Image: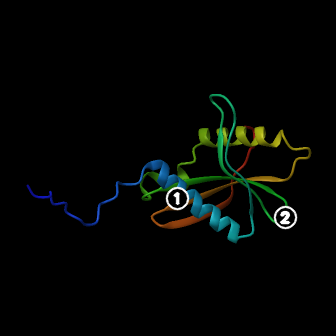
Amino acid sequence: MGIPLVKTGKVASPPATTKQLGDQAEDLALAHLQRAGLRLLVRNYRTPGRGGGEIDLIMRAPDGTCVFVEVRRRASGSHGGAAASVSWAKQKRIVFAARHYLMRLGTLPPCRFDVVAVQAGHLEWLEGAFEAGGM
């Protein structure tokens, strides 16, 4: 009886999951922001309980501003693209999480909300993309 033959060769890797693609986009955004002089404070900050919010990156700008960053990834620009996917409801959850984060600080720094859109291999950083306003 002979030894069974096993074909060797390159095995195709399974397609990346949505989570993996999102993590890759966050890694790209983080590296870009750090090259621009921002310092990472917290990654993937989540409020406790249901119905809360999550912030992809919380950064400190060189001038001391606390920057809350939402990273969005889209394969194409159809349906408005990555930046347009940050809906009013999503902004509200981000602002909620930012307020929760700021409650832990003794003094409130200046703050802003940025969006980093990663789309079709292109990264766009939108500083001050939205405001907390009346939320």
Residue at the image point whose x is 70% and y is 67% from the top: 34
The N terminus - image quarter: bottom left
Q: Which residue is mark 2?
A: 63
Amino acid type at circle 1 is Gln
Crowding near the residue tagged with mark 2, few <14, some 14–19, many ≥20 C-alpha atoms within 10 Å: few
Amino acid type at circle 2 is Asp
Crowding near the residue tagged with mark 1, few <14, some 14–19, many ≥20 C-alpha atoms within 10 Å: some
Q: Earlier in the sequence, mark 2 or mark 1?
A: 1
Which residue is at the front of the view, 4 or 8? 4
84 vs 126, left or right, is: left
How far across and down, in percent of the image, does residue 114 sit?
Answer: 68, 56
Say above or below: 38 vs 99.
below
Which residue is at the front of the view, 112 or 103? 103
The C terminus - image quarter: top right
Residue at the image point whose x is 44% and y is 51% from the top: 79
How far across and down, in percent of the image, does residue 89 sit?
Answer: 60, 38
32 vs 8, left or right, is: right
Residue at the image point whose x is 25% and y is 66% from the top: 9
Identify the residue at the far top of this view.
Answer: 50
Identify the residue at the far right of this view.
Answer: 107
Which residue is at the front of the view, 69 or 133? 69
How far across and down, in percent of the image, does residue 28 sit?
Answer: 57, 64
32 vs 132, left or right, is: left
Q: Which mark is residue 24?
A: 1
Q: Indicate how the structure is coloured in the image.
A: rainbow
Label 1 SS? helix
Of circles 2 and 1, the one toward us is 1
Distance CA(mark 2)–CA(mark 1): 28 Å
The answer to whether the residue labelled 2 contacts the one labelled 1, judged by CB atoms less than 8 Å apart, is no
How far across and down, in percent of the image, does residue 133 sit?
Answer: 75, 43
Question: Residue 104: which quarter of the image?
Answer: top right
Residue at the image point whose x is 69% and y is 36% from the top: 47
